[in-house]
Image (tube, rainbow, N blue to C red):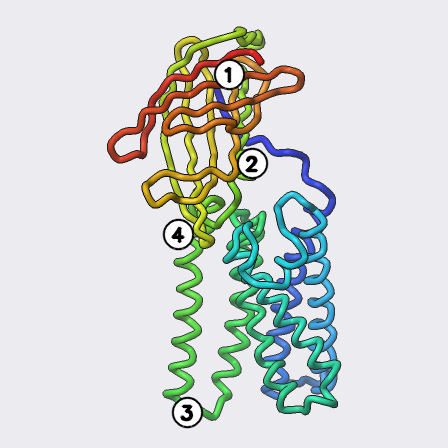
Amino acid sequence: MNVVAAATSPSFFWYLTRGSGAVALVLLTLSICLGIATTMRWRTASFPRFAVAGIHRSLTLLAIVFVGVHVATTVLDGYAPIGWKDAIVPFASHYRPVWLGLGAVAFDLLLALVITSLLRARIGYRTWRATHWLAYASWPVALVHALGTGSDARVGWLHGLAAASIVAVLLALTARLAGAQSGAAGRLAAGAAVIATVLGVGVWYRSGPGASGWAARAGTPASLLAQRATVRATPTSTRFVSLPASFDAQLAGTVTESQSASGMVDVHIDGTLSGGVRGRLRLVLEGIPLEEGGVSMTSSGVAFAAAGSPLVYQGSIVGLEGTRISARVGAGSKAIALEIELHLNASQTHVTGVVRGTAA
């Protein structure tokens, strides 16, 4: 039996969120590079200084528009539990709080740039300029946000886009440092800091978003993880096998546990079934860690697929008492009640047990 990921059909907003986020990152990168060029008083015969400054301003405004579209469509999509407050207040969301929070920080910095630009005549040039420089921080924050929580964080084209953005900004900074008046020592220290930052982001990505299991470690709710990782059984033959009205099966699998920045614990159990029914079973639960050990469950997801059957049964945990789990899953008009008795090994990384299923 071959098991592959199955997902619900993405909405129009989901595609628009991905596209607007990628375009916003490109526009922010170009804006940063042109902003650095204006500080160097860079110009050519075809582009005088005022033209460079004008393009920089237009790119920044366009980037803000696309960031606004990205934020709005993320909230309107409704797939992830993200509200309008989460888009503005950093690190307050229950969905990937750190990495979504970085997106809120980048958005807030751009909002500060817009507001201070509108009030420039009242707040003074020095205050506006200080805020303007602070807004440059939105680019690295947005980049880490895209890699940390973006839907395409592990896709090749986003890797290329992120790498091209980093190279472009590095070249602009190198040119800026080469023309700086801070002396050789200052330029060397600044260059070393830039290189160290890039290397740090690379190491973080390889061990974080680029590694398996990142969705759980990033703080994705257990119910969404179960929906994303719903298993689909591909029959080994053209003859489908009917699931019996009741069955007993042996379970063998692995247990992984992670804790998000908000303190919530995610527990994943992935196992294979043998005996009365062959197939796959996946349990995901999220909860609050208890002082005496264990987890007080707040949400859950269950996916069950039998070998040789085209059906995927999905549902949730309805009862949890120690290592005894009751679940209810369904596919179309068919429903199954599952009673699961688990036995963990000493390191609590592997699990065996018995699964009893009854048509409900």
Cα distance in 3D space between marks 3 and 2: 54 Å
Cα distance in 3D space between marks 3 and 1: 69 Å
* Mark sitting on residue 207: 4
Picture quadrant of residue 322:
top left
Residue 151 appears anywhere in the view: yes
Q: Residue at x 57, y 58 (%)?
A: 161
Residue 173, how many percent across, how many down? 51, 77
* Mark sitting on residue 255: none
Mark nearer the N terminus (3 vs 2): 3
Q: Residue at x 62, y 15 (%)?
A: 334
Q: Nearer the viewer, mark 3 or mark 2?
A: 2
The kind of residue tagged 3 is Gly
Secondary element at tag 3:
helix
In this picture, is 45 found above or below 299? below
Secondary element at tag 2:
helix
Cα distance in 3D space between marks 2 and 4: 22 Å
The kind of residue tagged 1 is Ala
The one of 214 and 323 positioned closer to us in this rendering? 323
The one of 46 and 77 positioned closer to us in this rendering? 77
Instruction: Find disc 2 in the rendering and name its residue.
Output: 228
Secondary element at tag 4:
helix
Q: Residue at x 54, y 71 (%)?
A: 169
* Mark sitting on residue 183: 3
- Quick check: marks 3 and 1 in contact, CB under 8 Å? no
